[in-house]
Each structure stands twice: as structure tokens, then as C-alpha cells.
Image (spheres, rainbow, N blue to C red):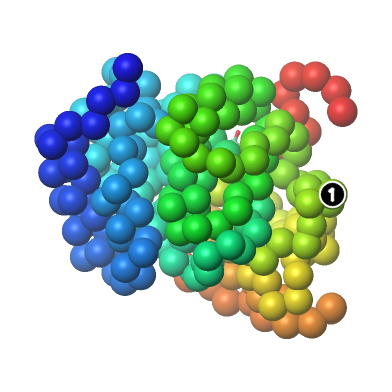
Amino acid sequence: MMIDSYLHKGMRRKLMQEVQKKGVEDPQVLRAIESIPRHFFLDNAFLKFAYEDKAFPIGEGQTISQPYTVAIQSELLNIQKGEKILEVGTGSGYQTAVLCELGAKVFSIERQRALYVKTKSLLHRMGYRAKLFYGDGYKGLPSFAPFNKVIVTCGAPFVPEALLKQMQTGARLVIPVGKGDVQIMTSIDKEGENNYKRLEYGRFRFVPMLEDRISGKF
Ligand code: SAH
């Protein structure tokens, strides 16, 4: 059973304030951090870490992103209500929940089947209506394109061409780019059909974006 107590709410308020101190200003993003029970997204053994501003293991060798990182990426996306967002790397679903709270229509892809199944059921139980897909984020979701915003939550060795193609003119992509264990947070604005503006926001650490699914064939 999922219980959200006053204790959890108090810890969440502190977490929100910590994220704010680190430089996140968007009031809606801060409100999302304060309202989403992050402990629902962690395995029981890690409950007491749910409200520390740190990344944590979620099984299958993956992590739930650090709240500060989730907040920065969400702020950079500058989401308007009703926008269509493509997320690559559903993972625990925490970032997905933040995007939903911001009023986005979220389409999220995860390449690990076990995580996809687990997170789909959790988000559903929590009442989020995100559309989740088991597949390869390098390919995006051509049949649901174009998107208003695209977010990648794993470290990409390069910017996948398919994601650029699936952006509407005026759309923004927020993606950590880098081959090693450090990535540069990057935003790419599609200003015209073949006209992109790229900006960088410093160093972050993500689990790598991998090609193809681990099990099963396409
Ligand atoms: N936003 C997530 C972050 C999870 S870590 C959260 O807050 O929990 C990144 C996730 O990206 C992992 O679950 C990993 O399996 C997934 N991933 C890696 N490469 C991928 C790809 N090519 N397509 C889709 N998902 C991918």
C-alpha cells in the first residue's frame, strides 16, 4: 500500500527548498517537487533516501534521477499546459510524473521491459495518464510526432537525428550529451526546418543511453 504521511510531506517541502537554493526558480516545477510522493518511486529498502537530493538505484541497473536534475530539465523545457512531450528513458517514472503535473501530455519510452511494466502500473495507480512505450528512444515515436518538447533522461553519445525530426518548429529538446560518465546538459531549439539553436548548461552524470532493447526483437 502507498502511504503519504505528514512526515513525507515535511521532508518533501525541505527537498523543494533545497532544489530552490541550488538555483531552480520555476514555481510550477518547485510545486511539482513538493507535491509528488517520490518515495512511491523507490524500492522499500531505500525509502529513507527518497527525500535526499540524490540519484538512487531502481533495479535493472538503472537510477531514479536526482531531484535537482529533474527540476533543471523540467525548467529548461518551459512546459505550457497541453503540450505534447516525448520523454526518452521512463525509468522510475518520477520525471514523467513531474511532466504530468506541469500539464503536459507525456509520451515516454523505456528500453527495459521490466521497468516499463513496473512503472506503467505505478503511474496508473497514481492516476497519471502518461502514455508509456517499450522501445528504443533513438527512434523516438514517429507515429505520434510532432512534439512540442523532447526530453532525454539518459546520457546520449550524440543527438539522435530521429528526435530532431520529430520536433515541431518552435520545439525544444533538452538532452544530456556526452560519451563518458559526464554529460553536458544541452538545449536545442528548432527555429526552422534545418535551423537549430544549441545552448549548454553545465556538467551532469546520467546512466548511458543504450541502443536496442535488452530482450526481445523489434
Ligand atoms: N527519468 C528517469 C531516469 C531513469 S535513468 C527517472 O526519473 O527515474 C534513464 C533510463 O533511460 C533508464 O531506465 C534506461 O533503461 C533508459 N534508457 C537507456 N537507453 C534508452 C533508450 N535507447 N531508449 C529508451 N530508454 C532508454
Q: Residues within 10 Å of mark 1 (few under 14, many from 20)?
A: few
Along the line of sight, which residue is nearer the eye, 58 or 105?
105
Q: Is residue 35 left or right of residue 154?
A: left
Figure quadrant of the N terminus:
top left
Residue 196 in sight in this render = no
* 73 displayed left or right of 42: right
Residue 188 versus residue 13 in the image, above or below = below
Q: Is residue 147 above or below residue 67?
A: below
Instruction: Tell me which residue sits at (84%, 49%) in the image.
Output: 143
Quarter residue 117 falls in? top right
Q: Quadrant of residue 148?
A: bottom right
Numbered disc 1: secondary structure: helix
Q: Mark 1 — residue? A: 143
Residue 135 position within the rendered picture, expressed as x and y whole percent measured from the top left: 75, 34
Q: Residue at x 75, y 66 (%)?
A: 167
| Residue 120 seen from this side | yes
| Vertical order, 122 against 53 (above or below) | above
x and y percentages locating residue 152 in the rendered image: 61, 52
Task: Please name whichever residue, 52 or 125, is drawn nearer the observer in this view of the structure.
Answer: 125
- Residue 102 rendering spot, x and y as whole percentages: 46, 58
Q: Position of residue 138 (x, y in %)?
A: 76, 47
Total marks drawn? Answer: 1
> Considering depth in this image, is 189 or 154 the residue closer to the camera?
189
Residue in the image at 76% along x and 70% along y? 168
Determine whether, in the image, residue 212 is placed left or right of residue 80. Answer: right
Is the CB of mark 1 within 8 Å of ligand 1?
no
Please, what is the three-letter code of the amino acid marked with disc 1? Ser
Residue at 13% of width from left, 36% of height from top?
A: 6
Judged from the image, the quadrant occupied by ligand 1 is top right
